[in-house]
Image (cartoon, helix red, strand yellow):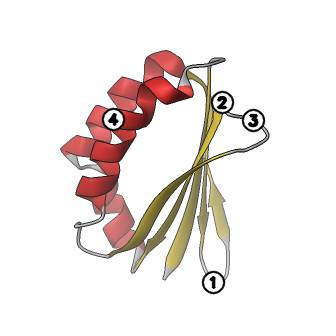
Amino acid sequence: MIYVIATLTTKPGAAPLLYDAARICIEKTRVEKGCISYDLHVSITDPDRMVFVERWETREDLTAHSKQPHLKDWREASTPHAVSRAIEIVHVDRVETF
């Protein structure tokens, strides 16, 4: 199993504009092969910071997820509102960062 922590910081006040697009992406992702959990959290100290916490059975499942149309839709919806993005993929023996 691997964990993913994907953080999106939006322009001030823009996060709520993305909630519907995020909900659609989450619903579609949760039924993907290998998805154990996929949850969105919004910081209580910084409402412009959205954090996706994901668990996947394998790195291959995560790679397949990255190619799904609903993830492309999410990226397109969020890009105009994004200030920064960070992704950490946590394996048992290492962490990948993007």
Residue tagged 3:
46
Residue behind mark 4:
21
Residue type at mark 4?
Ala
Q: Residues within 10 Å of mark 4 (few under 14, many from 20)?
A: some
Label 1 belongs to which residue? 92
Upstream in sequence: badge 1 or badge 4: 4
Q: CA distance from mark 2 to mark 1?
A: 30 Å
Residue 13 in the image, given as x and y percentages of width and height: 61, 19
Residue at image position (23%, 66%) is 32
Q: Residues within 10 Å of mark 2 (few under 14, many from 20)?
A: many
Mark 3 or mark 4, earlier in chain: 4
1, 53: nearer the viewer: 53
**Marks 3/4: CA distance?**
20 Å
Helix, strand or loop at mark 3: loop
Dot 3 and dot 2 residues touching (CB under 8 Å) = yes
Q: Is residue 22 left or right of residue 52?
A: left
